[in-house]
Image (tube, rainbow, N blue to C red):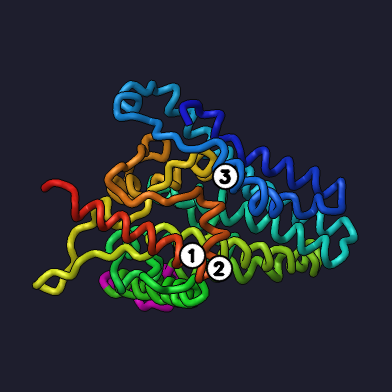
Amino acid sequence: MRYPLAYAMPVLVVILVIVGFYRGGVGFYGSLIGLVLIMPLLDEMVGKSIWPSEQRVAEMSGRAARMYDLMLWLGAIASVGLLAWALWAASTTPLAWWQLAGLVISVGLMSGTVGIVVSHELLHRGSPLCFPIMGLIGYSHFCITHIRSHHVVVATPDDAASSRYGESLYAFIPRWLFGGLRAGWEIERRRLARAGRPAFSIANRSLVWHGFSLLAIPAIWLVLGPVSALLFIGQALVAMLTLALIDYIEHYGLARARLPDGGYERVTSAHTWNCNHLLTNISLFNLGRHTAHHNRAAERYHRLGADHAAPQLPHGYAMMMLISLVPPLWFRVMHRELAAYHADRTLAPG
């Protein structure tokens, strides 16, 4: 994590997917195999890193900062470029159903990890490019709700992206999906109402960018054919499910206390899970430092450090995502971690 080139992993994933495609066989599922079998084990073996320290951040040169920014843009190019290549490849190469399924999953995992994480970073930097990137997976309302809803009501019952204690992944996903859509629409409706404009207008970003996603399907069909259109839809669904998995593990079971005036206590380190696993963070642009991100939302990814006051995920993101697929196992692991964290806070002096 000390060196910008460590964040070039998206390029390696692109190479893996393309090589797997042309080699054939299980190569079509190389990305899935990497996420399910290789990444969880490697993340455990490599271990944790608490870099960067406050001193390192303070000493970071402008050249180093520009290199970190370059890695972010490289990730964006890798994600969008892989999707573009896959749409072309699916239109020019006859594929059996299982080969197409492997390509859909591989591209969708890339879109759902690198594409979304890059878009998230660009959103916090005020870049409008977050919308087309998220539009490619049909989840552009994220660019509306993430700052104006999630960061405001995180760890409360009002947040569709905060999973609740005892809520399984499978109960969370529909609430997350429809709650996010509803929040995006409501934010835009109120914004336009203040400007004296109707909700159904070209100024409604939710309508415009979801329209972009829907219109992309027939456009791809006309230009590249039905197989490419099916791939576009499939990778978007995989990407959305990947985002749901990530959201599920980042705030599970953490809740802000209700105040006498009906509001909630301010957001603190106690309301987000921190993850210091090295491979998780270099593959997801420090997304595991989610606690620091919520505490300093405008901070760039390479300046986010470990938060030792936050609850700590016992494993890296890939392993936690796999565990979340089995609710009894998830509850056993996470309820134990929550109990230990709250016990430590109770015993802590002051």
Q: Is residue 99 left or right of residue 322?
A: right
Separation of marks 1 and 2 at Cα, in angstroms = 6 Å
Residue 133, image x and y in percent? 55, 54
Q: Which residues are magenta?
A: 194-204
- Residue 76 has which mark? 3
Q: Is residue 89 above or below residue 96?
A: above
Residue ID at (37%, 35%): 303
Question: Relative to the observer, which residue lies in front, 23 or 139?
Answer: 23
- Residue at 74% x, 50% y is 30
Q: Which residue is mark 2?
A: 326
Observer-side mark, 3 or 2, equals: 2
The rendered magenta stretch, by its main secondary structure, is classed as loop
Image point (32%, 60%), residue name: 339
Q: Of the residues under marks 3 and 2, which one precedes in the sequence?
A: 3
Q: Between 234 and 311, which is closer to the camera in this rendering?
A: 311
Task: Answer with mark 3 or mark 1, whichever residue precedes in sequence.
Answer: 3
Q: Secondary structure at mark 2?
A: loop
